[in-house]
Amino acid sequence: MPKITKITTQKKNTQRYNIFLDRGEGEAYAFSVDEEILIEYMLRKGKELDEPTIEVLVEKDGYHKAYSLALNYLSYRMRSVKEMRTYMREKEYDEDKIDYVVDRLVKEGLLNDQEFAVALVRTRLHTSSKGPMLVKKELIEKGLTANEAEDALQHYPYEDQVEKASKWVEKKLRLDGKKSFKQQIQKVQQTLMQKGFPQDVIKVAMEDVKEEKDNDAEWEAVVHQGEKALRKYASKAEGYELKHKIKGALYRKGFPFELIEQFLEEYVTEE
């Protein structure tokens, strides 16, 4: 019967041990086990092991390796059950070991989709510009049901949604001063929708925008876009036709008629 001739500690992981056996042909490395298994089976130098026991030890250690890998994956941040299963499959573990790992982690409270969802919502609220609808989509992609995602979004209250959207509007509204105020508003609204904010939140966030309009900046934008249009059409048209083309170009960019007319009077001659 094979006998343990030596047990050594692994250099990279002091909680794992290499087991050497003599099967009648001299000492040779046989397998490795975690400290937990070493203690459970009271493995020591001189102990005899039959082949069925060796197979059990190797199989059991495979489960323990999978569990240890999962713990390391959790050490970086919380994970959803779906994330854990996907990760373990990528590491090519079979479904039996994955089920074992997930069930154990759930029982130990280390995997909890509800707690994960709440943590993710709070993180996105404080560290990103994502609105609730985008956060909900992310939660569903990570394996939560729509109802579970909705429950977690209670931690992203309406007041915080409005505050986040309003701050983003204030920061971005006139980032591009070469566009009309109307175009800037439309762009901000579109971006807020893409970021996952609902219409009622966007409406409240945009309420005071018109009062913040900078007339000087709007005139500078008209001149900038008007001169571009003038350069574009000057070689193709003149007089009334030229003014008409420039007027149309500026109107499509969202500038008010009074500023368009002012630009035409000051920058475009009838000759």
Image (cartoon, rainbow, N blue to C red):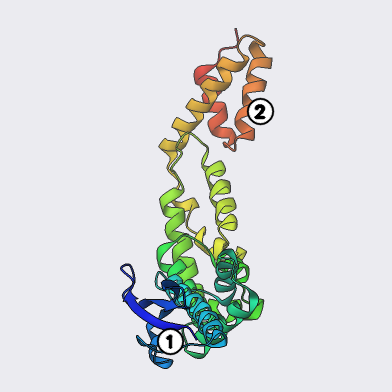
Q: Can you tell which quarter of the image residue 44 is in?
A: bottom left
Residue in view at x 49 percent, y 68 percent = 161
Q: Earlier in the sequence, mark 2 or mark 1?
A: 1
133 or 9: which is nearer to us? 9
76 or 65: which is nearer to us? 65
For numbered disc 2, what is the local secondary structure? helix
Q: CA distance from mark 2 to mark 1?
A: 80 Å
For numbered disc 1, what is the local secondary structure? helix
| Vertical arrangement, residue 240 with respect to residue 127, above or below | above
Residue in view at x 45 percent, y 49 percent = 172
| Vertical arrangement, residue 1 with respect to residue 191, above or below | below
Location of mark 1 (residue): 37
**Amino acid on which disc 1 is placed:** Ile
The circle drawn on residue 248 is 2
Residue 246 appearing in the image: yes
Q: Position of residue 131 (x, y in %)?
A: 53, 64
The circle drawn on residue 259 is none
Q: Residues within 10 Å of mark 2 (few under 14, many from 20)?
A: few
**Amino acid on which disc 2 is placed:** Gly
Image mark count: 2
Q: Can you tell which quarter of the image residue 6 is in?
A: bottom left
| Vertical arrangement, residue 215 with respect to residue 96, above or below | above
Please name which of the two marks, 2 or 1, marks the residue nearer to the observer. 1
Q: Position of residue 51 (x, y in %)?
A: 55, 84
Residue in view at x 56 percent, y 33 percent = 258
Q: Position of residue 139 (x, y in %)?
A: 58, 71
- Is residue 97 shown left or right of residue 241? left
3 or 8: which is nearer to us? 3
144 or 196: which is nearer to us? 144
Q: Position of residue 20 (x, y in %)?
A: 40, 76
